[in-house]
Every structure is written in structure tokens, then in C-alpha cells.
Image (spheres, grey):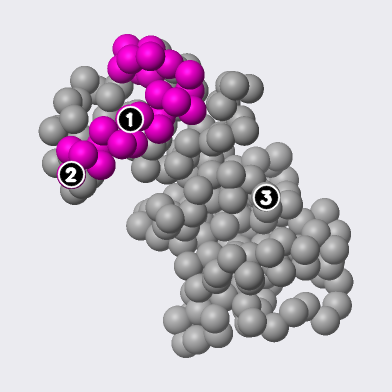
Amino acid sequence: MLDVSESVGKSQQLLLITHPSVQANAFASYLSDLLSVFVVVHNINKPLVQRLPRGTVVLFDIAVSNKKLNGIWRDIIQTQVKSPRLLIINSAQKYELYEMAKWPALYGVFRHDDDESRLIEGVKAVLHGEQTAELSVMHPAMYATVHTSSDSDNVPLTERECEILNELRHGATNMDIARALFISENTVRTHLYNVFRKLSVKNRTQAVSWANENLRH
């Protein structure tokens, strides 16, 4: 059972940007009751017609978006919301980290398969005025982008590459990684080649050393 006894007050507002549906409205009502905030559901296919109050927390459902809509909403959030605080929800592996970094005022990213409690605690953290969501509730791959070295900033790792690096940290072989991630060994080798190139390392040991410093899941 989530502890949500600390109300953040109805003066604050959550904006849920998604496809309008019965499920979306039910989720909005659930958040409103649970967190004691106003929650507004906005159609992702329609632009905002007016500026939103300062500090509005935006939940952007990226699972129902596309690259064109992403670009449109990045501009809208930046221009139509005063001091926005953005949380991306329902993220999938096909979204690379450099794409996430383009979003203004991004406070956290949550996967489509994250526990509900992870999302709720992240929203609570931002509503309570924390500069970022707690690292324990942020998407671990986003945490990795903050700590990547300057050598790899220009070519960030994908979420899949981060997953493979974490398998390496546990001593997994190529076959182990292939089985764990349901991919072929050839695909594993291709990912490792790309990781070594991006990180400017020569072998698995050096890659693991980099991961131990930069990927803290």
C-alpha cells in the first residue's frame, strides 16, 4: 500500500498528455484522488490554447506519440508552460537516450513496464518540489546519461547497450546475454562493438570499469 498521506494540495496541477480514453480518464481520477491534485487530460493530437500555471507537472505518454508529435510538444511545453516539470511515461526501448535529452525540464522517465509505485513516488517527489525525482524512481538509463563521460556525450548509449553493459558487470558471456535479452549472439557482438567504439575502450574489462563508474542502477 502506497503511503500518500502527505498531500501536495489541490492548488497544484498535473497535465496528462495522451490519447483521451476511458482508461486515461480513470487514471487521471485515480491520480487526483491519490495525490490530492488537479489532473487534466489533454488530447495529444491537439495543441494547448493557453499558457498553463507556473510549475505545472506534465505527464507525457510517449507510447502514443511519434517523432513529429514529440517535436511539436517539446516546443509547446517550452513556450506554453511557465517553469514546467516534465515526466515522460510509458517509455519503450526504441527511444534512445539522446532523444530523451532533447525534452525541456525533464525530471524523470518511466518505462511502460515500471511498477505503479515507481511512477507514483516519482510524481510525488516532483510535486513536493524536489529538483529531480529520486534516483530510485527515475528510469536507470536516464540516470546513466547524467553520468556519462564527456568522451561519450556526443554518441550516447542506447537503453539496450546499457542493458548489455549491466550484464557484463555480472560476468555474463555473450551467450548468457543473448539468452537473458532474447537476442542472437551476433546481435550481442554487434552491440558490444558499438559500445566499445562509443566508450573508446578496447575490451570487456575496460567496458565494465566504465559501467561501474557510470551506470548505477
Q: Which label's residue is closer to the chain start, 3 or 1? A: 3
Which residue carries the number 3 mark?
Answer: 102
Characterize the magenta stretch by its predominant secondary structure: helix
* Among numbered discs 1 and 2, the one appearing first in the sequence: 2
| Mark 2 or 3: the one toward you | 2
Q: CA distance from mark 1 to mark 2?
A: 13 Å
Judged from the image, the secondary structure of the residue bearing numbered disc 2 is loop
Could you tell me the amino acid type at mark 1?
Answer: Leu
Q: Determine crowd level at label 3: few under 14, some 14-19, many 20+ residues with C-alpha closer than 10 A.
A: few
Pointer 2 or 3: first along the chain? 3
In the picture of the structure, the residue carrying the numbered disc 1 is 192
- Answer left or right for 183 relative to 107: left
CB atoms at circles 3 and 1 under 8 Å apart? no
Q: Relative to 144, is 206 on the left or the right?
A: left
**In the rendered image, which residue does mark 2 sit on?**
184
Image spot of residue 133 (x, y percent): 59, 43
Magenta segment: 184-208
The spot of residue 195 in percent (x, y) is 41, 29
The answer to whether residue 14 shows anywhere in this view is no
Does 152 sit above or below residue 207? below
User: Dividing the image into 4 quarters, which one contains the N terminus?
Assistant: bottom left
Crowding around mark 2 (Cα neighbors within 10 Å: few <14, some 14 to 19, many 20+) is: some
Residue 127's place in the image compared with 209, above or below, is: below
Residue located at (35% from left, 29% from top):
193
**Left or right, residue 181 beside residue 49:** left
User: Quick one: 17 or 202, which is closer to the camera?
Assistant: 202
State the CA–CA distance, disc 3 to disc 1.
26 Å
**Do the residues under discs 1 and 2 have CB atoms within 8 angstroms?**
no
